[in-house]
Image (tube, rainbow, N blue to C red):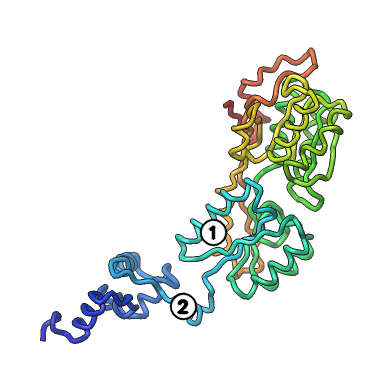
Amino acid sequence: MGPQSDPDHIIHRYRRKAGVPATIRDVARESGVHISTVSRTFSAPHLVNPETRTRVLACAEQLGYRPNRAARALITGRTYNIGLIVADIANPFFPPLIKAAESQARQRDYHIFVADSNEDAAVEEDLVRALAKQVDGILLVSPRMSNSLIELLSREVPLVVVNRQIAGLPTVVMDVAQGARLAVEHLAGLGHRAIGLIAGPRGSWTSREIRRSAAISARAAAADLTVIGPNPPTEPGGAAVAEQVLRSGVTAVLAYNDLMAIGLIGALHAAGARIPQDISVVGIDDIALSRLIHPKLTTVATPAAAAGRAAVDMLLAHGDDRRTTAQVSLQTALVIRDSTGPGPDPHSHADPGDVVASAPGAVASYAKE
C-alpha cells in the first residue's frame, strides 16, 4: 500500500480539507519526525537540530498548527507567560518599552501580561503576588518598592528589574547618571551657573542617580545646583513647581523626565518667562511629544525599546537562576534642540550647536536636531 493510500494519510488529508485544526501528530507526519521532536521544537528549541527545527516549523506554519499552551505547561512546568509591571502606563516613556518587550517575547513564543502600579508601591507588591503563580517571571519597570521587599518577592517568582540596581538580582539600567552629566555639562557650557534640578518621586532609583550625578557635575563646573522636590513625575507635577523655579533664581533647569519639563515650560510661559531666553529647560526620556512642543525640548534620550528587549532576554536566560548578578547598562544621549540657550555668564562662549567631547574614556553622545 503506497503512502497516498495510507489510512492515516487519508484521514490527515480529510482533516485539512474539512478545516479541522492540525495536531502535533499531523506536524510530525509531515516533517518526518517523532512527536516528541515536534514538542521539543516548541518547548525547548535549543535542544533540536537546527535543520530539523527549521523543517518542523515550516510544516507547522504550512498546516496552521498552533501548540496547545495548556498541554505544554503540564509537560514543561512553564506557563509561557511573562508579567510586566510599569509605574504609570499613561507616561509616554513606557509604551515603547512595553511594545518592544511584547515583540521580543512573541518571538520566543511567550505572552506578556501588562499591569500598572500607578506609582504606588503597595499596588506594585499586590500585582507581583497576584501574577506570581500565573507567569514564569516578572519584569519590574521603574519600581517604587524598597530593595528589601523586591529581594523578598524574588524568592516567590523570578524577577528582572529595569531602571534600578539591586545587588543579587538581574537588572537592566539606562545610564541616566551619564545623561545627567551630559545635560549639566551642556548647561554649564552655555554659561549657566545657577542650575535647578526638578527631582522625581520619592523612592525612585532613577531620581537618586540623576541627583547624584548632577551634583557632581555641577561642582566640577563651578555651578550651584538647587534641588526642588521630590515631585510627581507628571506634566502637572512639573507645572506645579514653576513658581519655585522662578523664585529660586536659577537660569536653567534639568527635569526628572520630559513630562515634567513640558509641564514646567507651559507654566513658565503662562507666568511670562521666555524659554530659553530667560530659563533653559532640559528633560529626560526623549518622548515623541518633546519634538512637538514649542520650543522643541532639549532632552536626554533613553533607550526604552532596547531596555524592553533586553529585559525579556535576561529573564528567559536567567529567570531560574536566583543567584545571578547579570546586568545590562544601556547608553543615553543628549539631544540638543531649542529649549536651551546661552546663560548670563559673560566668560562662556559655548555654541549650543557644538558637538562637545566628554572626559577621556567616558562614553558620551551629543546630537543636534
Q: Residue furthest left?
A: 1
Under mark 2, the amino acid is: Arg
Residue 130 visible in rendering: yes
Judge whether 270 appears above or below 141 on screen.
above
Q: Mark 2 points at which residue?
A: 72
**Which badge, 1 or 2, is on the more N-terminal residue?**
2
Q: Do the residues labelled 1 and 2 touch (CB within 8 Å)?
A: no
Q: Which residue is drawn at 80% across and 31% down?
A: 218
In the image, what residue occupies the spot 49% across and 56% down? 103
Q: Name the quadrant containing residue 248.
A: top right
What is the quadrant of residue 145 in the picture?
bottom right
Where disc 2 sits, the SS reads helix
Q: What is the x, y in percent for residue 336? A: 63, 28
Quadrant where the image shows the C terminus: top right
Q: Position of residue 144 (x, y in %)?
A: 76, 56
Marks 1/2: CA–CA distance: 21 Å
- Is disc 1 placed on a helix, strand or loop? helix
Q: Mark 1 points at which residue?
A: 313
Residue 96: x %, y % from top left: 56, 48
Q: Residue 72: percent from the left, percent from the top? A: 46, 78
Name the residue at 58% across, 29% down.
367
Q: What residue type is labelled 1?
A: Asp
Left of 308 or right of it: where is 20?
Answer: left
